[in-house]
Structures are given as structure tokens and as C-alpha cells.
Image (tube, rainbow, N blue to C red):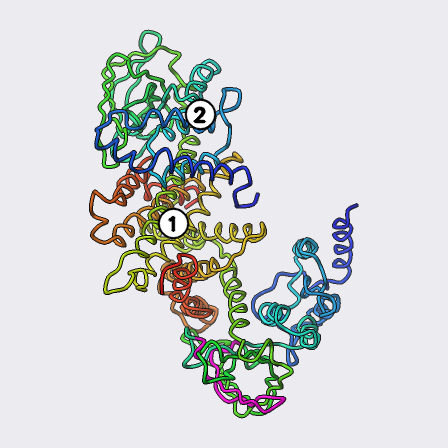
Amino acid sequence: MSNLETFRSETRDWLEENCPPLMRKPSSGEDDICWGGRNFVFQSEDQKLWLERMGTRGWTVPTWPTEYGGGGLSKEEAKILAAEMRRIKARTPLISFGIWMLGPALLKFGTHEQKLEHLPKIARGEIRWCQGYSEPNAGSDLAALATKAEDKGDHYILNGQKVWTSYADKADWIFCLVRTDFEVSKHNGISFVLFDMASEGVSVKPILLISGNSPFCETFFDNVRADKANLIGEENKGWTIAKYLLTHERTGISDMGLPAPLNALATEKRGTVDGEIADKMLRHQIAEHEIDAAAFVFTLERAKDEAKAGGELGAFSSMLKGYGTELNKARHELILKVNGSDAFEWEGQFSNEGAIARQWLRTKGNSIEGGTTEVQLNIIAKRILDLPT
Amino acid sequence: MALILNEEQQLLKESADGFFAEKAPISQLRHLRDSKNEVGYDQSLWKDMAEMGFAGILVSEDHGGADFGLVGAGIVAEAMGKNLSASPYHASSIVGASIIAAGGNEQQKASLLPAITAGETVATLAVDETGQHDPEGSVLAAEASDGGYKLSGMKTFVQEGGAADQFIVLARTSGNAGDRDGLSLLLVERRAGGLIVDSTAMADSRGWARLTFEGVQVAADALLGEEGKAMDVLEPVLDKARIILAAELLGMAQECLDRSVAYLKERKQFGVLIGSFQGLQHRAAELYGEIEVTRSAILKALQVADMGGDFRWFASLAKAKACKTAELATNEAIQMHGGIGMTDEFDIGFFIKRARTVQALYGDFNYHADRFARCAGY
């Protein structure tokens, strides 16, 4: 037996023994996601057990080094683990911004001590992170951020405000972009710091959206202390880390879920004539949309295969982000058309508390968050087409 | 299978790109047009293409071909699209050869496939009778006569009809317009009595023809495949042909973007390069995205078709998406070139003319969007 085959059979045995029964049932939605953190309320004993077992083994972050709490697996082994988990329909034990965004940045830019301090806690789901990037006057022009960090020797004192901070009300720590130099050009005075959200002077206010409740918050810093031990990379060199992290975020957003085609919904809701959706105009619009959607799905497949073959995704991720989010907006407009006036019900059981309308309105943010469509087009023009500035 | 080109295909791409850029650039098409060339392509180019193995790219090795598969055939078509290279490649090497390979008996294959591969015989399909692609709507009649068939009716929009030696004619041997059954494929030689070939000058300056059949008599052995069952042979061949047309359209769209971006980097107005204007940058960047997404759909369709099985949905997806993107790219190219894009002296206008005819060939966007939906069960 080859090493990989041995690994597969051992993994299969371990999962069989350690994945609790409830964690092999399909998740029924967002409430079933395990985010971890100091204040996380587990939905079940099985969910807690599953996180503990996987976290101890480092399999919440299979490819991270073992000394930092990871599984130390090779890419091939990680693939096998994922396949074996799929085989028994095991749920993902932990989802977090720490795994998805901060972790890769720390692995690349952090010191050994910083990695030792923070990565194992991410892996075990002990600390939940949020991202302090956007500010009221620094959205698309993120580098214009103005949250001030004053040098006090071994620490900084922070004053300012962040906005669109996802889950700031639930997170334990924040990775945050702050301005350490106001004299130099805007990209050269930014630093990347980490601090505890329980620190004195931090306050958080959730944001109500056009779609209703949201994970987004406004986050205020009033003389908050951040230790220099948690400055990642050099002072004033934070923009490099910020950009690296944004690439991860973008790829993640374009990769989120491949929804089922709309035709099944339309044939069920609107009926058929001779096997075709009864409303001819709607059928035409759905076909046009599904052509673009199918072509986009194959583009994600191609991007993955190119990356596997050693190609760099680079600015191609901007195209995926822009195209994918615009497509998703168009899709939800079509879902409204399929459902007719029923789609606008806002509360009540009939509409599952206005799920269709709220999801539709929420998609409007897809082409704004993580860099607007226009910013993605700017990146394509500059970095792929090499057009002059 | 990974959705990328393998090493062999990558090498073919490099050699095809280089070959057509050198041997058949747009200036050749311009010359064919200006000299009112009746053949519709440069015959020495076609000879060179045969030597490169392109003319027999889908033909099996038994019959002297390269048997490179559809992905390879698409790579060559894309390179031809970039350069607007005129040749009977699509008509004869893709459509003609595939029909004969799929429907022909051993004798028909042995006599025609090596000749197509060598570039000596050009075989082309005559399918449409009106301005709309509708194979099942064919009414050209083939009546039993003298142990063979007598053909009466007309065909239009026949690729390379100006130069073809053999016409593969979709004819009705029974049933009525709209019936899938009752259609048959018949081989008709160009010099057959009663066949009138009218070369039609189209916007793309290529070798199209309209055919009139005034009681054309053919022998029983002119039949390709089973009588009345033509669509079983023809539909998969048309689908392959459609994906290859999509690849040609992709080549045109990519070249339109490349030329436009190059122009944006050299043209100055208001004292600056116009490529620095965001209005134009976003047009170009959006077009880039559409082209990349189209590229994926086409490569997927080519790979699936090579694997066999039912690939109708993939073929209609590829052709529909390519039609839409090529329409966008050719329109945007003229807009981004400004006034000079409207002049005949500048080459960019050749792309929109060729693209629209290729879009119409074997089903336009609407035809394939409708078929895409039907294949998916709605």
C-alpha cells in the first residue's frame, strides 16, 4: 500500500470513530455553522465534541504546520481528508475569518512568536476574529483610512472608527488596519495590528440593512491599547499584508456556493406547456441567465485547474469576483420574477420571514463588499490589460 | 479531466497561432475580396494546411488523418478566427469529414476521407433553405428514380459552396417539413446535371453559395447512412461543428480585444492616451471577463464532445455564449477604435462582418438559447 492509501484508510477509520452522529446530518442553515470563540454557544454536545476532536488533531486547518496547531498534511493528504469527510457527509467542524483570512496572512508575514501565540487558538476555535478594514471615509479607497495609532513605546493608543466590521459583536479579537504615519503618502503609513475586542474603549453597534438584520457593525475605538508585540510585519508596511489578505477574501467570495439552476423553481411555480415554462418571456430570460451562469461555473473550474497546474490566479480573481457577484444579483432579480408578488412578503411563516425578499436585497451588497465591481474592473484594466493610469 | 490544455494541445496552439499569423493574416482575406476571388480562399494556403495535418485533424489514422480530437480542432479554429484565415477547414475537415466518418459506408469513407485529408477534395454540407437554420424544416425533395434519387429544390448559406467538389445534401425522402424522420443525406457532385451553383458574395467576403436542384439524378450509392434517418447522423456532427464555430468566434473576440487595447495605448486625445480614461477601461475590462467566461464554456464543450455521449446541451451553451460575446466584442472594437474603426482601410471592420455570418451559421444565439433550455428540460 502506498503512503497515501495508508493515510486514506487510517483517516477513514478515525473519522468513522470520531465524527459524532449529529455531525453527519446535513446542516439546516447558518445556525448550524460552528464559528468558535470565547462566547460561542454550541448548538449541541456533538457540535462541541466534533470541534474539540478535529481541533486537537489540527484537522480544522489540515495544511497548517503542526507546531502552530495545524494538521501538517500535504496537499494530497488534505484532499483525501476532504474526500473522506464528504463520503460520510461530515460537517465542516469550524468556519472562521481566522482560518480563511488572518491565518494565511500570519503564516506569511508573522514572526514565530506571533504564529505560536495566535494560530493554535484559531485552529482549536478558541478565538473568533473580525476584520477592521473599511471606515466611513475609506471604502473603495481603503488606503485613505484614518484610524490613528499613537506610538507609546511598547504599545499604541488607537482612536477612530471602522465600519462594515462583520461579526464585530461576536468576535474576540480584531485584525485591524491603522494609520501610524500621517506625513507620508497614504499607502506608506498603514500598519497591521491585532488586539482584543474586550479591551477598554472598544464599542460596537450592529448595522440594520435594507434586508434587515446583518452581521455588519460599526466599531469605535476610544483610546484603545494595542501591544506592539501584535504588530504584524513592519510598522507602516501594513498595506502589503492588507492586499494579500484581500486576494484571499475575493477568491473566497467568488467561490461561494453554486446555486441550483432556476428552471426547476420556475417549472414548479409557473407550470409548463409542452414541457416548456409556460411564461415564454420568463423562459427566455432564464435561459439567457443560465447560459452565463453555466459558463461562469466552468470558469471557476478552469481557474482551479490552472491553479493546481501551478498557474498564478492573480488579478483573474478580480474578474471572478466582479462577474460572479453581478451574476448573483441578476439571478435574484429573476427569482423575484418567478415568484411574482409572493416574493415581497417581509414577515410571517408563509414566506419564512421574508426570505426571498431579504436574500434579494442582500445580494445588492455583493458587488460592493470586498471591492466594488468598478474597483475590480480598474484592477483588470491595470494589471491584466496593462492600460495606462 | 482538468479544464486546461494538455501539453500536446498547448504545442498545437503555439504552432497554429504561428502558422496562421504568418501564412494567412487578414491581408490575405482583403486580397481575396478585392480580387473578387471565386474560390473564396487561397489554394496554396489550403495545401499548406493539409501538410500541417489540419485538413485531416478529425480524420482517423486509418484514413491518413491526424485524429487530434475536437479540442485540437477547436485550437486551430480559434487561431483562424484571430487571423480571419479563409479556408475550407470548417466546411470540409470538420463538417464534411465528420458526416462521412459517422454515416458513410466503408467504400465512401475510403474514397473520400483520404482525399479530404490531403486537401484534394472539398466536401460541404447543404442544409438550410431559408435565412433561418432549421434542418428538420428541409423540404428539398429526393424522389426514388431509376434505382437512385432525383433531387428538386434549393439550398442556401452553403459554406465554401463556391469551390466545393462534393455537396452533402440534406433531402426529404418522406414525411413533411418539420418531421425529424424522413430526411436523408445524399452526396452530389458539383458537376451533376441540373445542379446550379450560384456563388453569393456575402459581407464576410468568403466562399458562400446558393444551390438550385432541377431534377438532379444521383445513384443509390449516393446515400450516406440510412434513408430517412439523416438527423441521427447529422445532429451530433452539427453539434461538433457548432462548438468549432464557437472557437472561431472566440478567436475573433480575443483579437478584437487585443487590437482595441493596443489602440487605447497609442491613441491620444485631450493630450493623454485614451486608454487612461475609465469609461474606456471599463468597457475593455468587461469584455475581457466575457471572453474568459466564454473560453471556459467552449473548452468544456470540446472536452465533453471528445468523450462522446450526449453533448447537445454543452454545444448549444458554447455556441450561444460565443455568439453573444462575439457580438459584444466586434461592436465594442469599432466603438473603441472611434472613427477609424468605421473605415474600410482599417482591418477591424473585417471582424464584425465575419462574426455575424458565423453567428448565423448552424443556429444563432436565439436558436441555441432555446435549444439549451429544451435540453435542460424546460
Residue type at numbered disc 1:
Ala
The residue lying at 52 percent from left, 59 percent from top is A255
Residue beneath disc 2:
B51
In contact (CB < 8 Å): disc 2 and disc 1: no
Quadrant including the N terminus of chain B? top right
Q: Nearer the viewer, residue A307 or B112?
A: A307
Q: Percent position (x, y) of residue A195?
A: 60, 83
Q: Secondary structure at mark 1?
A: helix
Q: Residues within 10 Å of mark 2 (few under 14, many from 20)?
A: some
The residue lying at 30 percent from left, 41 percent from top is B355
Q: Chain of mark 1?
A: A
Q: Nearer the viewer, residue B51 or A323?
A: B51
Q: Nearer the viewer, mark 2 or mark 1?
A: 2
Q: Are marks 2 and 1 on the same chain?
A: no
Residue A153 visible: yes
Left/right of residue A18 with respect to residue B370 in the rendered view: right
Is A162 inside the magenta-drawn segment?
yes
Q: Relative to A160, does residue A274 appear above or below in the rendering?
A: above
Quote the CA–CA distance across marks 2 and 1. 42 Å
Q: Chain of mark 2?
A: B
The residue lying at 46 percent from left, 27 percent from top is B53
Q: Which mark is residue B271?
A: none
Q: Which mark is residue A287?
A: 1
Magenta segment, which residues? A142-166
Q: Percent position (x, y) of residue A84?
A: 69, 54
Q: Percent position (x, y) of residue A228?
A: 62, 84
